[in-house]
Image (cartoon, rainbow, N blue to C red):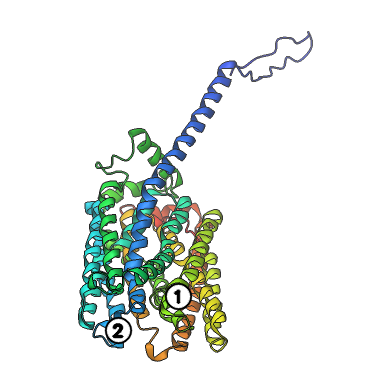
Amino acid sequence: MQNHISSNSKKGDIDLQIPSIIVTDDDDDEEEKKEKAIAENNKELKRLISKMDIRILPLLSLCFLLTVIDRSNIGNARIAGLTDTIDITENQYNLALSIFFAGYILFELPSNILLNKIGPRICIACIMIMFGCVLGTMAVVKNGTQLIIARSLLGIAESGLTPAITFYISVWYTESEISKRFAIIFSNGTVAGIVGGLMAYGIMLKFEGYQGLHSWQWIFIIEALLTITTGILVYFFLPDFPESQNNKFMSIRERQLFFIHRKKDSELSIANKEDEKNNRKQSLWDSIKLAFKDWHTYAFSILNICAYIPGYSLAFFLPSIILNFGFTPLVTQLMTIAPNLAASIFGIIIAFSVDHHKEIGIHSASTLLISVIGFALLIILKDHGTYALYISVILASTGLGPINSTFSSWCSCNFSDRTKRSIVIATVNALGNVGGAIAGQIYRESDSPQYIQGHTANLIFVICVVGGCVGLKLAYRHTNHKRDTMSLEEREKIIIENKLNVLGDKHPDFRYIT
């Protein structure tokens, strides 16, 4: 650009010096180069994200699919004759369902701390191989005591997987990308019901008596082999954390693009640079204290407990519930497919909507209202025939479908400090699994065939989660509004008073996802 001064004034006129802007060819070229560079960077970034998706999502989806199949296949094994061929009482069977979650409650937090130390590739691979081996031992149980021991060991071995996946995805993807990825992975929780039902149907049809074993034993053996094989694949193909020196997944250029992209997306990339410095000095113990002092940790934990009870109880007892609608045991395995398929599809749709609208609270509450209707109809229509009840159980399952992915996204996005987030995710999952332990006691054989007490309990818990989602959303909106209207003096005071601490999501410029 140049300043041009006019010299064409007549005598007696006021000589106005008018600066004008001349755009030269060099300026055009420079602007064009910048636009091309930005466009090229965007193309490279899209290619990188696609590369991440292709490598990460199928492996983690398969891991989560198998973990849900392996924890809930006991319901299919029961229909295939487990409780008829071993020495077990009803109370022992229900205890075997509940005791599984003791391992989750005790070992999820230590497992996520270990994940940060040894890396996700080794940690997740070891988890898969260990719980595959334990699952295989369930094929040789002879009585209720042995089944209880095997299920408790399975819970310990499997405990670290879900929080590891949740934290791992939150490290690799930004807030605007995370919900869809969680939906793709966690929708496999309901796909597991489809796959598990089909596998159980095929095994009952073809494997009963093969090599002198019952079909329920083959259910455990085949799924154990699949799980161990997946663990080996994870060891060789899952990328470590992005900053890891062992991570050969990204080139130097891709690594640069990745960290620029992450920084742009962060709410605190400009406002809270001091946190990055302080975070490196902060000890693990400091992060643990921050996590356990934060009321949001307990809010998400209570929501998870109340959501896990209907979710897990339906997963465990769906075959038994449907069997009591009047289907044969073999047909029952197939009839478990529709409720799980509906939940899976609905979960993915809701996740895309969450990412598009950048809102979670109302999405979660409104989807759960479908479950409220489903459980209410199961009670009201108890004497109205097979198909009315079957449609009701599909509605109950569908409404619960999106909860795992939406809650994981909500929790991951609202804790900014990485170490604290890792601890919170593990804690929320661990405490949430108290609900899983309760879930094993919701449906009792004495309450069959209509299970009115179980449906009523689940209806109450789902209503509680609806209220909790609305309450948490209002609390986040209030905090965001308070920070929006904060004066500069108040903002600076908070930052100065916490100079030596990592403010993270407590920083005045951080905004919660509502």
Residue for badge 1: 331
Residue 385 at least partly seen:
yes
Q: Earlier in the sequence, mark 1 or mark 2?
A: 2
Is mark 1 in CB contact (under 8 Å) with mark 2? no
Q: Position of residue 222 (x, y in %)?
A: 29, 64
Q: Position of residue 300 (x, y in %)?
A: 40, 68
CA gap, disc 1 and disc 2: 19 Å
Work out whether residue 307 or residue 500 is closer to the camera in this orientation and state it.
Answer: 307
Q: Position of residue 167 (x, y in %)?
A: 34, 56
Graded by Cα atoms within 10 Å as few (under 14), some (14 to 19) or many (20 or more), the crowding at tag 2 reads few
Amino acid type assigned to the residue bearing label 1 in the image: Val
Q: Disc 1 on helix, strand or loop?
A: helix
Q: Position of residue 243 (x, y in %)?
A: 30, 43
**What's the mark number on residue 177?**
none
- Total marks placed: 2
Instruction: Report which quarter residue 111 is drawn in.
Output: bottom left
Residue for badge 2: 84
Residue drawn at 73 percent across, 14 percent down: 15
Amino acid type assigned to the residue bearing label 2 in the image: Asp
Q: Disc 2 on helix, strand or loop?
A: helix
Q: Is residue 443 above or below residue 400?
A: below
Left or right of 446 in this view: 105? left
Residue 497 at least partly seen:
no
- Could you tell me which quadrant the N terminus lies in? top right
Q: Single out the residue that lies furthest toward the top.
A: 11
Work out whether residue 439 or residue 344 is closer to the camera in this orientation and state it.
Answer: 344
Residue drawn at 57 percent across, 81 percent down: 388
Graded by Cα atoms within 10 Å as few (under 14), some (14 to 19) or many (20 or more), the crowding at tag 1 reads some
Residue drawn at 34 percent across, 77 percent down: 80
Q: Is residue 356 above or below residue 456?
A: above
Residue drawn at 50 percent across, 78 percent down: 463
